[in-house]
Amino acid sequence: MKYEKVKLPKIIFDWLDNEIKQATMRLNVAQPFTTIAAILNEMNKKTFDSDLFWWINLPANQWKLIDALRYGYEAEPEQLYYVLLVKGDDESFLNVFRGNGRTQVDNRSEDNYWETKLTMPKIEAIDPRYKAFAVPVEEVEADD
């Protein structure tokens, strides 16, 4: 029987990848339950980002981590957004020049030079105020 890798949120993927390396070196851990217990024990000694803390403390997610250790894991693709400045206007999407990050407002077509589908961290890095205008790509494309 072939198992698929478990998809984890990027923040969890990065954290787990780092913890597994550290726990394996430190504890020579090979069993999933022992690894999760060791990681949770270490977690209780540290202060964590609240998103990570709340995700890891849900029992269903702990089982997901065990499955990730058993079958392998990979990062979930990050949610992509359009920044739509004027609702209903097909020419008011934020475009980011791939070369230098310069922005302009235009349609949502992407090419080798202009990017319009952005992750939330990228939107916030450009200007946190754009977060209010972020619309998931699927919502915009479903309206077509």
Image (spheres, helix red, strand yellow):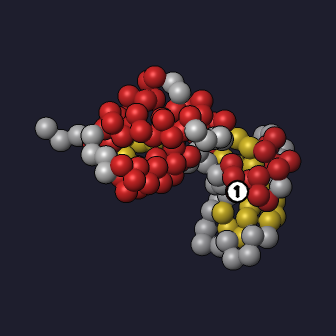
| Horizontal arrangement in the rendering, residue 54 relative to residue 9 (left or right) | right
Quarter of the C terminus within the rendering: top right
Element on which disc 1 rests: helix
Quarter of the N terminus within the rendering: top left
Residue 6 position in % (x across, y down): 36, 40
Front one among 63 and 19: 19
* Residue at position x 38%, y 28% in the image: 63
Image height of 34 relative to 104, above or below: above
Q: Quadrant of residue 131?
A: top right
Residue 126 position in % (x across, y down): 79, 59
Image height of 62 relative to 42, above or below: above
Which kind of residue does numbered mark 1 sit on?
Lys
* Residue at position x 37%, y 57% in the image: 25
Front one among 132 and 89: 132
Image height of 122 relative to 73, above or below: below
Residue bearing the label numbered 1 = 122
